[in-house]
Image (cartoon, rainbow, N blue to C red):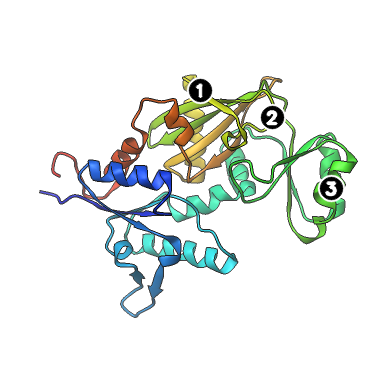
Amino acid sequence: MVRPLTIAVLGEPTGWHVGMLVEAIRRRGHAAAVVRWPQIGVEVTSAGDRFAPDELATADRVVVRGMPAGGLEEVIFRMDALARLAAAGVPVLNSPRSLEVAIDKYLSLSLLTDAGIEVPRTIVAQTPEAVEAAWRSLGGDAVIKPLFGSRGRGIERIRCREDLDRLVGADAGGGVSYLQEFVPHAGWDARILVVGNQTFAMRRRSDSDWRLNVSRGALVEDFAPPADWADLARRAAAAVGATIAGVDLLPATDGRLLIVEINAVPGWRGLQSVSEADIAGTMVAWIEESAPGWSPERA
């Protein structure tokens, strides 16, 4: 008889998503532990790395729920430690590499296009002259986004020279500017959550803001996407190496269906509010299936 799994959830103990996962893990008969990113430690020895805390070192599976906050040194160490943990044989969901790819909007969109998936026209620039040239190349109506970010934070529209000077001019020489074409749409997009081979979907609608993030007040409703939309979301997740992913699809008024973003640590609170499905339970079932040597018939 195979013992229940010990699953470590990497995130903040007070988070809604962490709580839902821990509840689902325990409901399905497994042991759950929550580990915060700052708790991670490693001792380098000739016998291999020794990870701390014990809840992380002894886990059968690690589920990432939330990305590490902090400075460059903290982020690099935490992601490297997670990669070394996976290399030591502890399955990590999603894989450290897929987390790194998905959080980088430039790299994720580049890999999506390699997979034949259509995305908005995107230009990344580092100098004031290149930023202005990019804006003009995008028709003088562009969206500027942080290269790393989520929930619509830092996303602004540049429609005139005054917008360009206000949003970019002061900082363009000291960092990376990420610009996309502004895509006219009908006031809604679709978020498809991929969990293994299963998908869940909602539509996000706003009559007051072109940004369709729930955090900006967009309303959510249950949505049954066409089969080819669900297939497209699965392809997008596979392109960045994620098995759990939130994929944002935007139907443009010119007839294109674009993927504008993919998230390898997706939230599902809004989706759960309009769905009767047990989303956290489905995630834990996927964790079970992907754990080496585990079988529900033998547990």
- Residue 209 numbered tag: 2
Q: Quadrant of residue 49?
A: bottom left
Residue at image coords 46%, 55%: 96
Q: Nearer the viewer, residue 137 or 67?
A: 67
Q: Which residue appears farthest toward the left when viewing the image?
A: 1
The numbered mark, 2 or 1, whose residue comes first in the sequence reads 2
Kindly indicate the quadrant of the structure image that contains residue 259: top right
Whether residue 159 sits left or right of residue 268 in the image: it is: right
Type of residue at label 1?
Glu
Q: Is residue 65 visible?
A: yes
**Label 3, on which residue?**
166
| Residue found 42% across the figure and 44% down from its top | 16
Give above or below for 141 relative to 132.
above
Q: Are marks 2 and 3 in contact (CB under 8 Å)?
A: no
> Going by the picture, which residue comes out furthest to the front?
14
Q: Position of residue 234 (x, y in %)?
A: 46, 33
> Where is the C terminus found, in terms of image quarters?
top left
Whether 36 is drawn above or below 149: the answer is: below
Closer to the chain start, of discs 2 and 3, is: 3
Asked whether, in this view, residue 267 is left or right of residue 283, the answer is right
